């Protein structure tokens, strides 16, 4: 099973002051690495945690793997953005990743949106959420 990590849990894991830090540690720690991410998730996480050696080290060590090229899947990403408007780019990439790396589980804190997103047009995304 592939593990895809969205921005929220990654930020919560790295930021001890985040209200969901304990949840992120409890959920993510036992999951096998590498955790799959897209560049949009890394960008958002970098923005929220600021200068994070832990984020760089996790990527460098192979614990995080960029497993999606948005340009190669442009039509699918745009289709998702149109279908679920307003949907942000990172979410569209994560949904497309869930299709590309099926079977997978998405770890996210975004319950409202990920409960309505579908992969392959109609299948609910398997997700771990607080």
Image (cartoon, grey):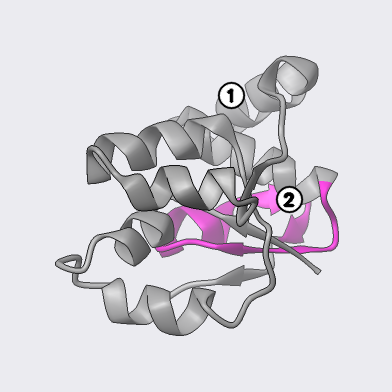
107 on left or right of 50: right
The residue lying at 69 percent from left, 72 percent from top is 32
- Give the number of callouts: 2
Instruction: Decide which of 31, 4 is in the foreground and name it.
Output: 31
Res 84 quadrant in image: top right
Q: Nearer the viewer, mark 2 or mark 1?
A: 2
Residue 82: mark = 1
Is 92 covered by the magenta stretch?
A: no
Instruction: Decide which of 89, 12 is in the foreground and name it.
Output: 12
Mark 1: few, some, or many residues within 10 Å (few <14, many ≥20)?
Answer: few
Q: Look at the picture and state if 54 lies above or below 30.
A: above
- Rendering coords of residue 78 (x, y %): 65, 20
Q: Look at the picture and state if 12 lies above or below 41.
A: below
SS assignment at label 2: helix
Q: Which residue is mark 2?
A: 98
**Residue 40 can be seen, yes or no:** yes
Q: Quadrant of the C terminus?
A: bottom left
Residue interval drawn in magenta: 101-124
54 on left or right of 101: left
- Rendering coords of residue 53 (x, y %): 34, 46
- Rendering coords of residue 44 (x, y %): 37, 36
27 on left or right of 64: left
Is 121 covered by the magenta stretch?
A: yes
Residue 66: mark = none
């Amino acid at each position: 099973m592939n593990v895809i990590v969205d921005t929220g849990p990654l930020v919560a894991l790295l930021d001890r002051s985040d209200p969901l830090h304990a949840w992120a540690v409890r959920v993510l720690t036992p999951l096998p690495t590498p955790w799959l991410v897209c560049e949009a998730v890394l960008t958002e996480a970098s923005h929220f945690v600021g200068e994070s050696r832990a984020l760089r080290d996790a990527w460098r060590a192979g614990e995080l793997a960029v497993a999606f090229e948005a340009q190669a899947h442009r039509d699918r990403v745009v289709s998702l953005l149109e279908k679920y408007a307003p949907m942000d780019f990172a979410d569209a990439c994560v949904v497309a990743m869930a299709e590309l790396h099926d079977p997978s589980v998405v770890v996210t804190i975004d319950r409202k949106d990920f409960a309505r997103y579908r992969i392959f047009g109609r299948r609910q995304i398997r997700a771990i959420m607080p």
